[in-house]
Amino acid sequence: MASPPDASELARERARLEALARQPLPRRLRGYLQLLGPGYLQSAMTLGGGTVSAALFAGAIFGYQLLWVAPVAMAFGVCMLSAVSWQTLSTGRRPWPAMREHAGPFFAWAWALGALLSSIIWQFPQYALASAVLVDLAELFSWRGLSPELAGGAVLGWALVVSGLYGRSPRWVRVYESLLQAMVWTIVICFGWVVVRTGVSDWGEIWRGFVSFSVPDARNGVAGATLVLSGLSAAVGVNMVFLYPYTLLARGWGRAHRELSRVDLLLGMFVPYTIAVSLVVIATANTLHLDPAYEGMRLSPVEAAGVLASSIGDGAGRLVFGLGVLGMALSSITLQMLTCGFVGVELFGLTVGTWKHRLATWMPVPGVLGCVYWSDIAVWVAVPTNIVCGFFLPAAYLGFCVLQRSRSYLGADRPEGPLATLWWLAMLAVTVFLVVFLGWYGIGILAP
């Protein structure tokens, strides 16, 4: 890395972790809460336009029935990313050359190219969503001169500045992560406030939505399987899988951080994501569900905000909804740019922090055109985009399954015993499930 973490700071952190390791679990968890970081980046990346789109349609069309998708999808992600962190922190090696050497060039190139292409593709709906929300917020404050194109330019400017913070120094890495942590919890608070104002009349129905695991039939012109696939694909994308180990290395984490990394994934990624997506589904179900005038694919951010506003007040509803969605889109855009930068580091031999690395982070910039061409269907367009990008994921997952059992790569750190076997089988099951589910439903959904 261009700016390695401060050695004395890392030494103090390792000493603190060694001391925590001797403490009971509750005290360890309290100590870990002060050290979380990379998991929040994953939350910020996955809480984007793809996620909010799938959640909005899930609640609007199927009510509480698809609440189970978010925690299941993220549990899949935690299973795989915990293996990625174990491998990276045990060896200290950059994962892409490790995969190329120990799993094979096919998996390494499929992973890197999938991360690059999905990061670029996902930018188009993110900009469409962010610009549409910005235009609505401007109108809320009686400024009607903001066009989608100008709003998209403002979002691009923000993304260039914020993504440029990463890699300058260890301090700026921390600043960047703290900024994204704040954005993640702002999203949660915004949608939590909407749910409080709209209320919940049947908690039993919400509970059934989390445990039913059903795939409902088509309604309002949208198939239940489409939204399940979209939610699964949006939760942990192949670009997230690429970015995650590099953020671990950027923080200077190593073997001493392995337990912390698992807690970080649980509390920094799984918990905020599940809470935020569930709140979006519940809020939308409370206001849009079974509206006979609702036409599935034509929902725009402005319309969604307007319906929520009917329950919690026009100005407040549009403001809270808009800020929540805007935070989702902005965080994802910057992190997808960061992913492209790390892909450039590996594919072109760049050095982090150099001007060439900065240029690599700009590869997704053409996505700003989404605010021009897709602003009228900004919500729906992210749903098929999620599914398309989901096809890139199984190859990366299979590569990490191979690495998890590689003695030449992990050596004495290769997990052994019944729990290790169960862990590996769970990784394999997730991979097979995605292959079968994407193959069975995804191709049919996307085919003309």
Image (cartoon, rainbow, N blue to C red):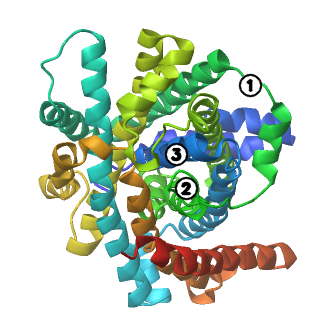
**What secondary structure is marked by label 1?**
loop
State if disc 2 and disc 3 touch (CB < 8 Å).
no
**Above or below — where is 193 with respect to 239?**
above
Residue behind mark 2: 231
Residue 157 is left or right of residue 185, and the answer is: left
Residue behind mark 3: 57
Which of marks 2 and 1 precedes in the sequence?
1
Which of marks 2 and 3 precedes in the sequence?
3
Residue 3 is left or right of residue 101, and the answer is: left
Q: CA distance from mark 3 to mark 1?
A: 19 Å
Q: Which amino acid does the dot numbered 2 rest on?
A: Gly
Which of marks 1 and 3 precedes in the sequence?
3
Residue behind mark 1: 200
**Above or below — where is 151 with respect to 211?**
above
Specify few, some or many for label 2: CA neighbours under 10 Å numbering under 14, 14-19, or 20 or more.
many
Q: Residue at x 68, y 38 (%)?
A: 32
Which is more foreground, mark 1 or mark 2? 1
Q: Residue at x 55, y 56 (%)?
A: 231
Q: Which amino acid does the dot numbered 3 rest on?
A: Phe
